Image (tube, helix red, strand yellow):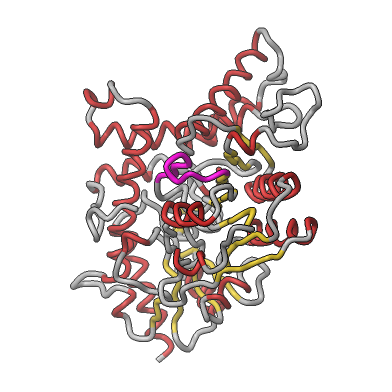
Amino acid sequence: MNNEYNHGVLFADDYQKNLKAQFCYADEDPQYGKRLFFENSGGSLRLRSAVEAKASLEEFPDCPERVRGRGFDLSAYVKNGTQEILEVIFGAKSGALITELSASQTMFHAVGTIMEHVTWGTNAVTSSLEHPSAHDAVEYYCNRTNREFRVVPANTATGGIDPDEVMKYVDKDTCLLSIMAASNISGNIMDIKEIVRRAREINPEIYIISDTVQHAPHAVIDVEDWRIDAANFAPYKFFGVRGCGFAYVSDRVASMPHRKLIQKDADVWALGTPTPGNFAAMIAVIQYVCDIGTHFMGDEKAKKADKRSLFIEGMHHIHLQERALLYRMLEGTKEVPGLRHIPGVEVYVDMEDLTSKDLIVAMGIKGIEHSACVQKYLEHGVTVFERLKSSMYSKRIVEALNLEGAIRVSPLHCHGTDDIDEFLRITKKIADSVK
């Protein structure tokens, strides 16, 4: 975890505005008008270059599995994109890439392959904060393989999962452990590296998976350093396009029996003809982050750096920018009070140490039901979303945090302090209207 700069470091105003200009509809919707899009956990602002890269390749009728002409050109996007996703985003030095229509499908595919082909172990462990795709995948395959399903409870004060608590559920007979990298409601960042270290002390052969869908757009993923066997992300939450999901699997998982064409190599996980545009879109996202890295590293130093190093530098500064925006949202300024200081506003699972948080705030306003409050925000030109017990995606998670529900507020690094201040002014206006 990054403990440098507890309150973050803001981009220069001109640079922040330059970044925002690279996203589609960052400040307004063509039908609904001017707005603040603070719902980058349910989706994400789309990077224009990613959308254009996908669209440009969709125009061609050629098959990307041909070895000549345009087909060969298209196949290069798949080959290069696969390599960049594994090496640059995941930080993998080996292993294989799973491609599906969604990140949820990749999670089920990875969990199922491991649990159906590992012959030892009587239980599998996950947490109460997991997205249903991770939680339900483990439960589903526990039922299929007749293993005990164990769920680690959340720390209701921090909104996270504590390593000490995880170790109460892991033993020498645990075949699989699945813990998400960051919560999609509280924003709490889990100490995956420490969890893995301690779990492997108990059981060196354990398979460990981390759902990195929420964390990937905010900070660096490093499967080698974390020593995990699988991780996934959703391009549509990472400035990219919908309709695809990617996951890394380690060498020892990659060659396990799995759904594939018989004549393909043992570590190939792709089924059918790939979509070059999906890979081209992620190549554009990677380049965008690397450009941020180059900006802060400097041209001379950047020329000598590999793409992973540039990507890490870019994500480092994205994380610092978002931490500074988070601090501004919570504390405000002399002119505009932050969420912690607006009467009637409640910040759930709040914590002083922002180095353990992604740019997500779970909040509520006393006297207004969460869905009604989200509607009020929309009427003021702000897009946020409620996470409620009535939702299959949220029920277990909000209950694990002892909440009835929450309004999830999630800006992005390309937003500026003016966006945060406007959100705070609108929040105060809504809170004052209840009095």
Main secondary structure along the magenta-highlighted residues:
loop
Residue 331: x percent and y percent?
A: 26, 71
Give left or right: position of 191 versus 229: left
Which residue of the protein is positioned furthest toward the bottom in this rendering? 435
Q: Would you say residue 35 is visible in this rendering?
A: no
Residue at position x 58%, y 50% in the image: 206
Residue 64: x percent and y percent?
A: 68, 19
In the image, residue 409 above or below residue 109: below
Choose between 24 and 194: the one closer to the eye: 194
Residue at position x 53%, y 32% in the image: 52
Which residue of the protein is positioned furthest toward the left in this rendering? 334
Q: Would you say residue 376 is visible in this rendering?
A: yes
Q: Which residues are magenta?
A: 220-229
Give left or right: position of 406 versus 263: left
User: Residue 317 lies in what quarter of the image?
Assistant: top left
Give left or right: position of 83 versus 23: right
- Total labels drawn: 0
In the image, residue 424 above or below residue 283: below
Residue 355 shown in magenta: no
Choose between 176 and 209: the one closer to the eye: 176
Assign the C terminus to one quadrant of the image.
bottom left
Residue at position x 44%, y 50% in the image: 26
User: Residue 272 lies in what quarter of the image?
Assistant: top right
Choose between 210 and 430: the one closer to the eye: 210
In the image, residue 179 above or below residue 82: below
Residue 364: x percent and y percent?
A: 46, 79
